[in-house]
Image (cartoon, rainbow, N blue to C red):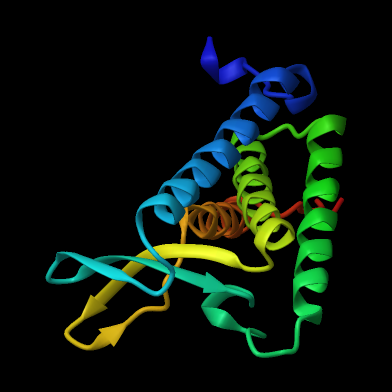
Amino acid sequence: MLKNHVFNSNQHRLPIFSLATALILMDQGIKAGVALTMPVGTSEQVSAWFNLVHVLNPGAAFSFLANSGGWQKYFLSAFGLIISAILTRLLWMGIQSFIESFAYILLIGGALGNVLDRLRIGAVVDYLDFHWADLHWPAFNLADIYVMSGAFLLLTISFSTPAATSEST
């Protein structure tokens, strides 16, 4: 019976780390496709509210720290590697929640996808551009979607997990 099934991430290491690897490969594959088919700085309209673009972002989300002189490449890469190492260690030790494990996988896949870009070309390849008229949301990529989805899942389960209560005698 599924109700009594206890999930433990350390018993599912191969599928967990295979999924994280697949997420990174999908992210890097799409970025390679963008780099091969679109020159940097170009844009192709797909619909009235969506463009495919090829933008190099040397900063973090929403181009935060983009004009900081280059040190941010190393800082953001180190930060992504450290967070990924911590989450990998937690998964290796055993997480009892499938949703929490999946959130960690998304965070690892997204962080490492963007770290690979920073270390390889010094910036993150962004290609998704959503807009309404002339108001554009900052361009982003699949790795960013992974990170935001993982963070959203963790936030959601933090609010849905009942707090420990003590009974008075």
Q: Which residue lies most toward the left here? A: 48
The one of 24 and 106 positioned closer to us in this rendering: 24
Number of numbered labels in the structure image: 0
- 25 up-or-down from 144: above or below: above
Which residue: 76% across, 69% down? 76
Q: Quadrant of residue 42?
A: bottom left
Q: Is residue 13 left or right of residue 143?
A: right
Residue 28, horizontal then vertical, whole percent: 55, 45
Q: Quadrant of residue 118?
A: bottom right
The one of 135 and 102 positioned closer to us in this rendering: 135
The one of 105 and 99 positioned closer to us in this rendering: 105
- 71 up-or-down from 30: above or below: below
Which residue: 53% across, 51% down? 146
Residue 10, horizontal then vertical, whole percent: 80, 24
Residue 121, horizontal then vertical, whole percent: 66, 62
Residue 34, horizontal then vertical, whole percent: 41, 54
Which residue: 77% across, 49% down? 84
- 50 up-or-down from 12: above or below: below
Which residue: 51% across, 54% down? 149
Q: Is residue 81 left or right of residue 128?
A: right
Q: Is residue 74 left or right of residue 61?
A: right
